[in-house]
Amino acid sequence: MTAPSAGGQRTRQPRPKAPARRDMPPIDRKARLRIPPHHVTKQLPAERVHNWDEVYYGYTPEPAMFEAQRCIQCPAEPCVAACPIGNDIPGALAQLELGRIAPAAAIFRATSEMPELCGRLCPQEQLCEGHCVVGKNAKPVAIGKLEAFVADWDRRQRGGFPVPAPSHASGGRVAVVGSGPAGLAVAEQMRRAGHDATVFEVWPSAGGVLRYGIPNFKSAKSIVDEKIESLREAGVEFRTGVRVGRDVSWDALRAFDAVFLAHGAGAGRRLRLPGEELMHVSSATDFLVRANLPPEDLPAGQREKPYVGRHVVVVGGGDTSMDCVRSAVRLGAEHVTLLYRRSENEMAGRVEERRHAREEGVHFEYLTTPVRLLGRDGAVRAVECVRMELGEPDESGRRRPSPIEGSNFVIDADAVVVAVGYSVDPELLGPESGVVVDDWGQIVVDPAGRTSQPGVFAGGDNVNGADLVVTALASAHQAVPAMLDYVAERIAERTPAAG
Ligand code: SF4
């Protein structure tokens, strides 16, 4: 899950010691294994396709406490080892089962700047829940939804995220480029240490992929708004609609004591097929931002809702393609088809997302790939496809698809969305940065997040390629200690020695 970055191995920062669990009654593990799962409620498909609200209603305190009791507090803590940021899950659940929701939230917040978002967005079946010992013979403990519940409850009690107010002004100044999860995490940690933090964001509003990449039915934008507000309150400055190299020069960035590059990997890959230039063929990013965001959060020229007509075809096999098909359903398309060139077994995204898409009426065409887009009067009207068969595994370990000769067929399409992956947008860095990137445009860093330029650090998707919110946080956490040291040295250099 946590692949080595372009420049170094990923290592986890040591997590704070787990709080004592001495107040817990003695654990009867066998009895706990008999506790049935307490499921979280969600909107019915027929209802949710007509709104953009979150699918899950989330836990309420009592069922959450029962579900937390299903944790058998196993000493090996495989769930913690599988969490990229090392959340003390058993520690938090031990508090929750006793009804101590605020202390449970504090435990998650000790290692995560945004547990409410990770709880919603992590592919838990591959991470914490996928390693839960209870899950060997039953449904794993619903760690993600419990994490989201305690963090939501805590936020509601406080009236927002805890404000990371610094205890002193250090005199240090840090620039952060990009306001997605990695950028926000670094801005928060720098501010906590007393440094001034300025965040530069190219989109009109702050939040990066949290605002512009994730549909409302997976996580409400109000959570991102609250996060940004808490950082503003703590003194973080956000400069939005600003592109590095165009609106702020690299010389201006170098005037800061340190820079953290977290501009993500938001450039959609293309199919490179005939007809891709036709009207109503869009990238996943363009489709999702226009579908999910109000005009005031979008640049001029991107403010109209995307056209879907009756038939929408989405090409891709990851979670972004599920976001696109489900957005197309909510925009009113009558027939939404997903084309994926391998079988469901090879799909990279979450099973839950596919289940939700199917429940919402999306049709899946596996082992199918487009070969050209057909148009009429300049607009797309159909997709010519070919069936595929799977051969030996390729370098990714998945079986390589190859076309079956003569199997071509045509699907109607009033709109086509291309969701075949993301890369780093090279323009967001610019050649004058001097920062070394690899062949894919990803920034090369050492294990402490240092780039080739002194004082310039990087983390998140622009280092690792498009990945998860939680892996972006892990990458930011990796860079924070070296950044703090670097800024402290810069401050010391300009502070006259006493005596
Ligand atoms: Fe699980 Fe993700 Fe939360 Fe870690 S951050 S405990 S992996 S849901």
Image (cartoon, rainbow, N blue to C red):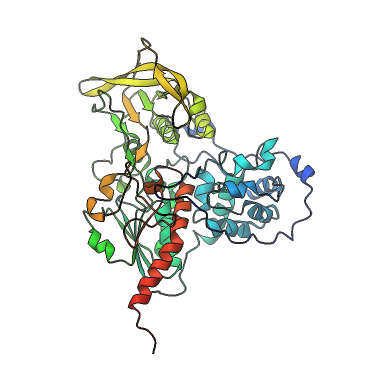
In the rendered image, residue 318, in percent from the top left (x then y), is placed at 44, 33
* Left or right, residue 389 beside residue 274: right
| Residue at image point 33% right, 77% down | 494
Q: Is residue 167 above or below residue 296?
A: below
Q: Is residue 230 visible?
A: no
Choose between 99 and 49: the one closer to the eye.
99
Of residues 458 and 217, which is closer to you in this image?
A: 458
- The residue at the far top in this view is 406
Give percent across and percent down for residue 193.
Answer: 45, 69
State the residue at coordinates (43%, 30%). 317
Snapshot quadrant of residue 186: bottom left
Q: In the displayed structure, does residue 486 sit left or right of residue 115?
A: left
For the C terminus, which image quadrant?
bottom left
Total marks shown come to 0
Task: Pinpoint residue 341: horizontal percent, then vertical percent.
Answer: 41, 23
Q: Is any atom of residue 305 visible in this view?
A: yes
Residue 429 in the image, given as x and y percentages of width and height: 28, 51
User: Is 290 placed above or below 192 here?
Assistant: above
Q: Nearer the viewer, residue 452 or 308?
A: 452
Farthest bottom residue in view: 499
Residue at image location 61% in from the left, 54% down from the top: 88
Where is 184 relative to 360, above or below? below
Q: Is residue 165 above or below residue 453?
A: below
